[in-house]
Image (cartoon, helix red, strand yellow):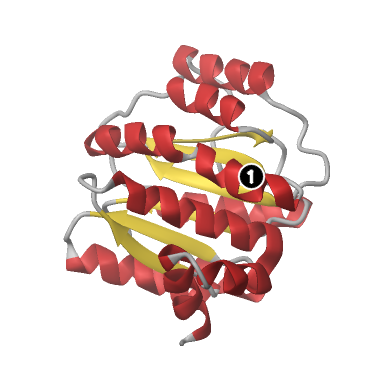
């Protein structure tokens, strides 16, 4: 990974395979708006990982007529593994990356993700972070601090949490609020909800609040994110 990142560097076999896949399937992103797509890949997340893999293409579909989107996959798993791909510009490439990752038991590393996104923004514009998970096992005050830094950079976090845990919902909402983003819950029983949320976040990354407002006329997920971001 480039210097300055808080994430791990190439090492063990499975990770080397992931990075090799990233190089092989990457489609040059050009000047497309950049979005970081971060997922919890600890063991409990396998069903959600599979769901996200199946619906992420909607991010690219939603922005195809708006000039496209470049997405970087970030995941954490185990107790000290947190990885980032290159930015890719189509759904096939991102699917290829995701299919090369297996979930593994461990603790959340959301702080590392937030710091990575902050550092990535220092190397080039990043329009948004999408964070998908179901737990927060870190000190929330530390996460608040980095989320506030993202807010100062104008880099909102869209935090989508699976499950009914109210403490996790509150934590994701805090990260979203301090970064200027939005939070929402989804359920594995309704996969269309996550798909719609990802599309709405991608529209924001491509066209900002004006694009989200336009989409909100017909799209409930866009309305939900817009309401969080504007306090409406």
* Number of numbered markers: 1
Q: Quadrant of the N terminus?
A: top right
Residue at 52% in and 52% down: 199
* 225 on left or right of 204: left
- In the rendered image, is residue 78 in sight? no
Q: Report crowding for label 1: few under 14, some 14 to 19, many 20 or more residues within 10 A (C-alpha).
A: some
Examine the rendered structure and indicate whether residue 209 appears above or below residue 79: below
Q: Nearer the viewer, residue 157 or 110?
A: 157
Q: Give the answer, above or below, for where 40 lies relative to 153.
A: above
SS of the residue at dot 1? loop
Residue 228 point in image, percent of width and height: 45, 77
User: Hey, which quadrant is residue 64 in on the image?
Assistant: top right
Choose between 157 and 195: the one closer to the eye: 195
Q: Position of residue 59 (x, y in %)?
A: 55, 46
Q: Residue at x 53, y 14 (%)?
A: 17
The residue lying toward the viewer, choosing from 198 and 80, is 198
| Quarter of the view holding residue 205 | bottom right
Which of these two is toward me, 148 or 179?
179
Residue in the picture at 27% in, 66% down = 169
Residue found at the far right of this picture: 31
Return the residue found at the far bottom.
232
Residue position for label 1: 5
At which x and y percent is residue 14? 45, 15
Taking the image as shown, residue 72 lies to the left or right of residue 196, namely right
Task: Find residue 220 and report its image quarter.
Answer: bottom left
Residue positioned 59% across, 74% down in the render: 213
Measured from the top left, where is residue 150 in percent x and y?
59, 67
**Left or right: 230, with 192 as reference point:** right
Say whether residue 104 is visible. Answer: yes
């Amino acid at each position: 990974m480039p210097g300055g990142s808080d994430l791990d560097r190439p090492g063990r076999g499975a990770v080397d395979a992931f990075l090799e896949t990233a190089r092989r399937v990457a489609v040059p992103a050009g000047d497309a708006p950049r979005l970081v797509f971060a997922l919890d890949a600890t063991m409990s997340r396998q069903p959600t990982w599979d769901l996200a893999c199946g619906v992420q293409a909607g991010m690219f579909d939603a922005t195809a007529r708006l000039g496209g989107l470049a997405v970087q996959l970030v995941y954490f798993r185990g107790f000290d593994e947190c990885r980032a791909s290159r930015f890719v510009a189509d759904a096939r490439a991102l699917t290829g990356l995701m299919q090369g990752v297996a979930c593994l038991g461990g603790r959340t590393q959301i702080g590392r993700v937030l710091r990575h996104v902050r550092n990535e923004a220092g190397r080039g514009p990043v329009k948004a972070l999408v964070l998908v998970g179901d737990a927060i096992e870190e000190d929330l005050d530390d996460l608040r601090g980095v989320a506030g830094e993202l807010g100062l950079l104008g880099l909102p976090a869209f935090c989508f949490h699976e499950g009914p845990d109210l403490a996790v919902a509150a934590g994701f909402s805090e990260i979203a609020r301090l970064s200027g983003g939005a939070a929402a819950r989804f359920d594995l029983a309704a996969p269309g909800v996550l798909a719609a949320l990802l599309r709405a976040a991608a529209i924001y990354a491509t066209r900002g609040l004006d694009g989200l407002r336009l989409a909100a006329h017909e799209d409930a997920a866009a309305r939900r994110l817009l309401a969080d971001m504007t306090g409406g």
